[in-house]
Image (cartoon, helix red, strand yellow):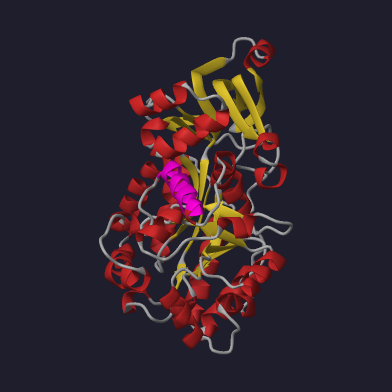
Amino acid sequence: MPRCALRGQTFAFKADPFEAGPDAAVAHDSDGAVVVEDGRIVEVGPAAAMLARYPGIRVDAYPGQVIMAGFVDCHIHYPQTRVIASYGAQLIDWLNRYTFPAELAFADPAHAAAIAEIFLDEVLRNGTTTVCSYCTVHPESVDAFFTTATARGMRVAGGKVLMDRNAPAGLLDTAQTGYDQSKDLIARWHGSGRCTYVVSPRFAPTSTPEQLAAAGALWREHPGTLMQTHVSENLKEIAWVRDLYPDCPDYVGVYERYGLLGPGANLGHGIHLSEREKAVLRATGSGISHCPTSNTFIGSGLFDLAGFTEGAAPVPVGLATDVGGGSSFSMLATMRAAYEIAQLRGHSLHPVKAYHLATLGSARVLRLEDRIGNLAAGYEADMIVLDPAATPILAERTRSAGSLAEVLFALMILGDNRAVTATYVAGRRVGGSGS
């Protein structure tokens, strides 16, 4: 792609705000420029100096608006697109009443492709440039997801769900067929373009010990792939796991036994973990996806973000919408919910930390923190532009803002997809409210 530049307020990270503090972590130019070429960021700096070094370069100008890395959603279910905003269920009932019936339809490749189109369009409209998604048990659902993302040039991660018990017959595989189909999909998609494969046992209750052992073997055999599952989301779920796996010390202990922990392990929720379980996650380098709108919408509980991210040995934590249990595709809304949950737990989540969770934090969980999630030289040019005056109330609130942090906070509390002026994927503008 030809060289181009974006000009506006630039917002990036030069350190982890959970370690260095919010003020020391931010790189900000009130009039900055980002130079992009061949899908990568070449340079970021003050606009006057940057543009003088690149005479004649094409400039997309966004005066007063915030240019930053695109959002990274590290836990989402594209097959649940149609069940978002479904009424009145908690986790187990949610699966039986809404999720499993919706997923049965993904045996049809045409249906899977149609939902993948709607899903990724909505993701991009909300400024999310990378997702890590569960597909369904059907290999066709994985093909549809990766094919649709590749057509948009997106960096995505995903995989076939593994389930061999406690689900409708049309959604069950076996330990062997799940292994074989996943292996074929890894060969077809892992490392193809910007695709990363994720070994995906749904959660311990829907897999036998034999299937979890096969999933662990599959992950070990394919270095560079990721692993995703769910853990400790709901109290009834935890009791169910205790009954199904009585020889394991706890829920995390199930995944520990079958080789499903380590760098690149992405465990969704983790709301009710014991101190032993947290210690195991720290020791193994396993990550947690914090899904605040889902945790409140289906009544699961209040995640202890500070308990995972503060202190000498933090657990890698990313931020996620968890659509369709989650109630919004917007990472701005998801940050708002994370802030509110932290408040209920007696902790104020600083906006710089929230944006880090929604970008580099999620990228770290996905082992992509050297490629995506930051506005810095060498990173893939997945970027968004946020407008602090997108709505009358945003404009009124940010008019008196005295710092970038105040602007970012107003955007995450008052903003929605109207605040996403532009979304860029690999340096190419693909949408936004300003299109």
Q: Please, is residue 176 above or below residue 196 in the view?
A: below
Magenta stretch mostly in which secondary structure?
Answer: helix
Q: Position of residue 311 (x, y in %)?
A: 70, 56
Q: Is residue 54 left or right of residue 340?
A: right
Q: Residue furthest bottom?
A: 247
**Residue 279, quarter of the rendered image:** bottom right
Based on the picture, tell me whether residue 341 belongs to the magenta stretch: yes
Task: Place residue 313 in its image quadrant.
Answer: bottom right
Q: Position of residue 177 (x, y in %)?
A: 47, 77
Is 291 or 199 nearer to us in this picture?
Answer: 291
Q: Is residue 414 left or right of residue 409?
A: left
- Whether the magenta-drawn stretch holds residue 116 is answered as no
Give me the residue at 64% from left, 53% from top.
367
Task: State which region is magenta.
Answer: 330-343
Q: Residue furthest right?
A: 312
Is residue 74 visible in the rendered structure shown here? Answer: no
Q: Quadrant of residue 17?
A: top right
| Residue at 56% across, 23% down | 9
- Along the horizontal axis of the image, is 28 left or right of 411? right
Residue 307 relative to residue 15: left or right: left
Q: Quadrant of the N terminus?
A: top right
